[in-house]
Amino acid sequence: MTDIESRIDTSRPHTARIWNYWTGGKDNYPVDREAGDRIRELHPGIGAYAKADRLFLGRAVRHLAEHEGIRQFLDVGTGLPSADNTHEVAQRVAPDARVVYVDNDPLVLAHARALLVGTPEGRTDYLDADLRDVDTILAAAAKTLDLAQPVALMLLGVVIFVEDDEESYAIVRRLMDALAPGSHLVLSHTVTHPDMADVDAAVAFWNEHGTPRLTQRTPAAVARYFDGLELLEPGVVSCSAWRPETATPDVAMYAGVGRK
């Protein structure tokens, strides 16, 4: 058994595997499916949230590659490989695009080695690191990416795992400060809202039974991650409302793209 395999815990539900279950993947265990079904009972729309966030990723990456000329992507909190991963979307537009994935989940890393393989013209790499390990992430990413050139920093559904507000803002600022002008922040975050009590109930269930714990923030608090950046239209909105190809209902996952 490898070191990564020895770190996989199948006794407790894990967010990456539940997300995989909700989006139709097969890389999950009975404990994940049981927790996923229970959360879906509390909040029936959660599967749509997972899919909306994935579609937002595709639209944001495609826009950055097609219209902003971005050729480098640093995707922190990758999650389990699915359809249209960051490198697939980016390299479909620009085969020479470079992508570095970062995650500390052992199952994600095991699958990344096999599945996150890019084009011959570009480069695709992955790092075993936690979002809080900013120096480690930047030093390792610099072996694949040229940090003196614009980079898209992808933080989809990952800062929710940093409970302290100021720590989470500081992490995002440190990462963006290290990137060149013209870089972009792409971020999504679960929100709490007075009209979404079922979301709060689902999060409470998850924090009692699953790992790692997650933190909800208000839409205004999510917008604060983009302080000092030029927000691309339409700003920080439900991820389903960020330049959708077809009209879809809002979800309790807010997102935005900001330019440095």
Image (cartoon, grey):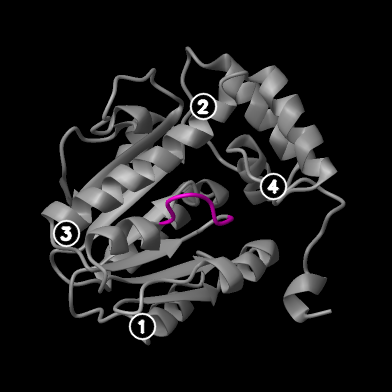
Residue, far right: 11
Distance between mark 2 and mark 1 Cα atoms = 34 Å
Closer to the camera: disc 3 or disc 1?
A: 1
Q: What element does badge 4 sit on?
A: loop
Residue pointed to by mark 4: 26
Mark 3 vs mark 2: in front: 2
Q: Amino acid at mark 2?
A: Ala
Nearest to the observer: residue 242 or residue 90:
90
Tell whether position 51 is magenta.
no
Residue holding disc 2: 48
The earlier-in-sequence mark between 2 and 1 is 2
**Camera-nearest label, 4 or 1:** 4
Q: Magenta segment, which residues?
A: 80-85
Q: Which SS class for mark 1?
A: loop
Q: Is residue 113 above or below residue 87?
A: below
Q: Secondary structure at mark 2?
A: helix
Above or below, 162 relative to 139: above
Q: Which residue is mark 1?
A: 144
Question: What residue do we see at 69% from left, 19% from top?
Answer: 42
Q: CA distance from mark 4 to mark 1?
A: 30 Å
Comes first in the chain, label 4 or label 1: 4
State how far apart marks 3 and 1 are (Cα).
Answer: 21 Å
Mark positioned earlier in the residue sequence (3 or 4): 4
Q: Residues within 10 Å of mark 2 (few under 14, many from 20)?
A: some
SS majority, magenta: loop
Residue at image location 18% in from the left, 76% down from the top: 149
**Circle 3 — which element?**
loop
User: Would you say residue 83 sits in the magenta stretch?
Assistant: yes
Kind of residue indicated by mark 3: Lys
Q: Position of residue 159 (x, y in %)?
A: 48, 51
